[in-house]
Amino acid sequence: MTTFKIDLKTKIISSDTNVYLARAGKQGHLFAQVLAEKAIGPDLPDLDLDLSKGFDEEKNLIAKINRARRLSRWIQSPVASRGDKPPKSLGDYDNEKKRSGHAQIEGIVRTYFKDMKAGDVLVIPDPQLFGQAILAEVLPLEKVAKAVPGAKRYDG
């Protein structure tokens, strides 16, 4: 039998509130971290967005996404075969072509840092079948995006 917990302080979702479904990492592997930190964002290490002038004024977005994706692949590869850590300099990614899935990743970044507004709601399901889900309200965006601890990864 399925049971539900009801929170009588639950936000009333008005017609101008958007509801987003978000995964905590590619397959939900960051669910415990999202729950513990009470924060979520794209799983892109060292994305380093400067939001002080707004998302549309962010310079080098494509290079920053490419750098973060390469670093993520490097982190997830076996330590014995990963080679040198990818360069931090954005200049190394200026002319790099967009890899498969880039448009989807860029869309996720745009949604988190431009489209979502304070008061919108996120539904974050636990990847476990019949697991919990987090219902979260979006807070106002800060000028500098904060890094949220992700999966326990080691530079090796």
Image: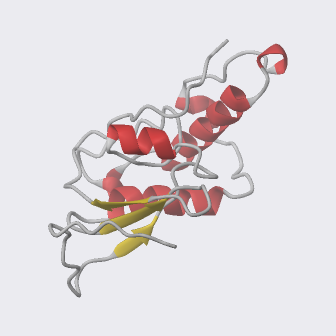
The answer, for residue 99, to whether it is visible in the render is yes
The picture quadrant where one finds residue 130 is: bottom right
Between residue 7 and residue 13, name the one nearer to us. 7
Which coloring applies here? secondary structure
The residue positioned farthest toward the left in the image shown: 9
Q: Is residue 153 above or below residue 124?
A: above
Residue located 71% across and 49% down the image:
97
Q: Is residue 123 above or below residue 69?
A: below
Between residue 60 and residue 135, name the one nearer to us. 135
Instruction: Please state the horizontal and vertical placement of residue 83, each as a whole percent of the image.
Output: 78, 16
The answer, for residue 94, to whether it is visible in the render is no
Residue located 62% across and 42% down the image:
66
Instruction: Please state the horizontal and vertical placement of residue 21, each as a whole percent of the image.
Output: 46, 68
Between residue 145 and residue 43, name the one nearer to us. 43
Between residue 40 and residue 46, name the one nearer to us. 40
Which image quarter is the C terminus in?
Answer: top right
Q: How many marks?
A: 0
Along the horizontal axis of the image, is 112 left or right of 81? left
The residue positioned farthest toward the right in the image shown: 81
The picture quadrant where one finds residue 77 is: top right
Q: Is residue 17 above or below residue 107?
A: below
Along the horizontal axis of the image, is 85 left or right of 22? right
Instruction: Please state the horizontal and vertical placement of residue 32, each as a whole percent of the image.
Output: 47, 41
Instruction: Please state the horizontal and vertical placement of residue 55, each as a whole percent of the image.
Output: 33, 55
The residue positioned farthest toward the front in the image shown: 1
Residue located 67% across and 18% down the image:
85
